[in-house]
Amino acid sequence: MKKGAITSQFHTVSIYCLCFLLIAGMFLITTLVAAKTKKVLMLGNNITQVETATISKNVKKVQNYTFDYEVTKDPKLAKADAADFDILWLGQGEICEGGWRFTDQGSEAVLEFVEKGGVCIVVEQDHDDAVGCPTPWLPKPLNGDETGGAENFELTKAPEIRTLFTKPNKIERIVTNDRWHNPDKAFITLATVGKHLIAALLYHGKGAYIITAMQNESQAQLDTNLPFIENLLFYTATLQDEILAVEPHHKLAGTWAQLKMNP
């Protein structure tokens, strides 16, 4: 074979190889970008309009994650499918506000969403002493308490806290109200105000709950809480990607302390 023909074939093969590598590289980049996007279903706009609007407008990207939001007013949560959404946000007063507002279907939808690998974030609910706030949407007992507002808090020593109060923001204030107490031992308390918890983690099935007493009724409260909301969504995304893949879940507490992720 002539030298020119060999050279031509070599160039052709080289071009094919470069094209293959380029396409493979683009596919890999696309896959990595897609893996960093979290879809959030927010139950909201029945009690306050400012929470969903503020979060969906201001928290679109945190660190290496982007967040796509869809808002539903349906207390039956017909759209709450862990195959379609990564995070379920139960908004301000959507469960309890002046009485029980949820439905049996909604409670079952939350339990199933978390059991199948979703992460559910719970915002402050109205724990009226005369009415109470049932928690059939939780797999373990937890009681609400009608309390006054507060912005201070104390962290526990639980290693599961990780970046929740430090990344991307150092959190010094959170507006809270009607906090939680008497948790089942399965809850991992992360932060407290006196005898009440304002942040806790609970594993269930292939997913988890993150319980907060964060109050988002007004724009001023949301403006104060926005740095914590950014941290909370980043924490949740990291939790789902890097922790919930570890099986079985009864080993997760020890695994969490050992893993060195997102220092």
Image (spheres, rainbow, N blue to C red):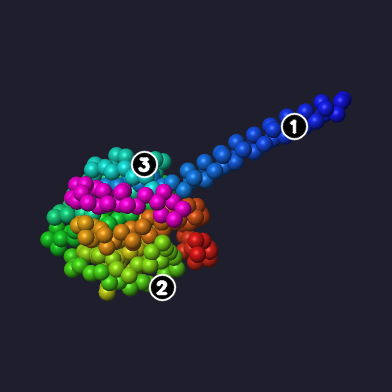
User: Which residue corresponds to the image point at 42% horizontal and 63% vertical from the top-left?
Assistant: 167
Locate residue 23, reporting x and y percent.
Answer: 60, 36
Q: Residue furthest left?
A: 130
The N terminus is located in which quarter? Answer: top right
Residue 126 appears left or right of 85: left
Residue visible at 34% across and 45% down? 69
Numbered-mark total: 3
Q: Nearer the viewer, mark 1 or mark 3?
A: 1
Magenta span:
44-66
Disc with the residue nearer the chain's start (2 vs 1): 1
* CB under 8 Å between discs 2 and 3: no
Residue annotated with mark 2: 157
Label 3, on which residue? 81
Image side of residue 152 versus residue 113, left or right: left
Q: Is residue 51 magenta?
A: yes
Under mark 3, the amino acid is Asp
Residue 143 or residue 16, whichever sits in front:
16
